[in-house]
Image (spheres, rainbow, N blue to C red):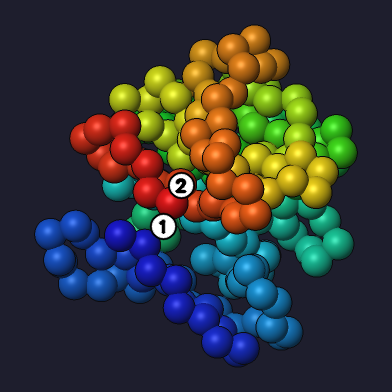
Amino acid sequence: LLITAADRRQVVRYTMGAEGSPLNNVGNAAFAAPSFGSSRSLDGIDWSWAPDGSPADDYLVFSMKETVASNYDLNLIRRDSTGSPILLATPSTSFNELDPVFSPDGTKIAYVRGVGGGNQLFVCTIDYSASPINCINEVQLTHTATNQMPCWTYDGTHLLFVRSSGAANWDIYATSAASVDESIPPVNLTPDTAGTNEAHPACYPQDNSELN
């Protein structure tokens, strides 16, 4: 469990085991100006947000940028906060990379990149054997509309995500993690909800259910 608590002066991050073990403070740093949705990173220097913990409970992946004017990039840091954040090398250096989430087996990361006039869904494989750890075999899953908030199904075969096209409402879609450039078209799971928005899908660990 990762808990982020913040006010206008500082952000504090804690981790706690699912069994209810004591809180472990993994980051406490002041920041100069309040900014909704962003905070200072664990090293107290850079802007970071949207952390996700690995299934093995040893790493956190998150989006970070070095200055207010720079882009968000994917980074890893050890859960116990030892060592510095590791920049995951991805092909893009001029677009924001956001909403990273580990696959259930911890071998891949799904994330969103602001490219092509909208946010598109990508997946890469984590090369833990590299020094430093790196992101390889990147695959672009979507090419249309604006997509965000990816979530893996429990078996790692599909991703749920939120999509909007133009002025349309937000709907929850599902896509195969093996789909490349929408070769397998995403399926709209909430098509009959005109006038309402659905967001923040969450997959349960033991079935394919989703929670709106």
Q: Amino acid at mark 1?
A: Thr
Whether pointer 2 and pointer 1 mark residues with C-beta atoms closer than 8 Å, the reply is no
Is 146 rendered above or below residue 3? Answer: above
Quarter location, residue 16? bottom left
Is 39 rendered above or below residue 90? Answer: below
Residue 120 pos. (x, y %): 71, 34
Q: Mark 1: give few (<14), some (14-19) or many (20+) Cα within 10 Å.
A: few
Q: Amino acid at mark 2?
A: Pro
In front here: 22 or 172?
Answer: 172
In front here: 179 or 186?
Answer: 186
Is 8 rendered above or below residue 172? Answer: below
Q: Residue at x 60, y 89 (%)?
A: 9
Label 1: state its secondary structure. loop
Residue 201's disc is 2
Q: Mark 2: give few (<14), some (14-19) or many (20+) Cα within 10 Å.
A: many
> On the image, numbered disc 1 is attached to which residue?
82
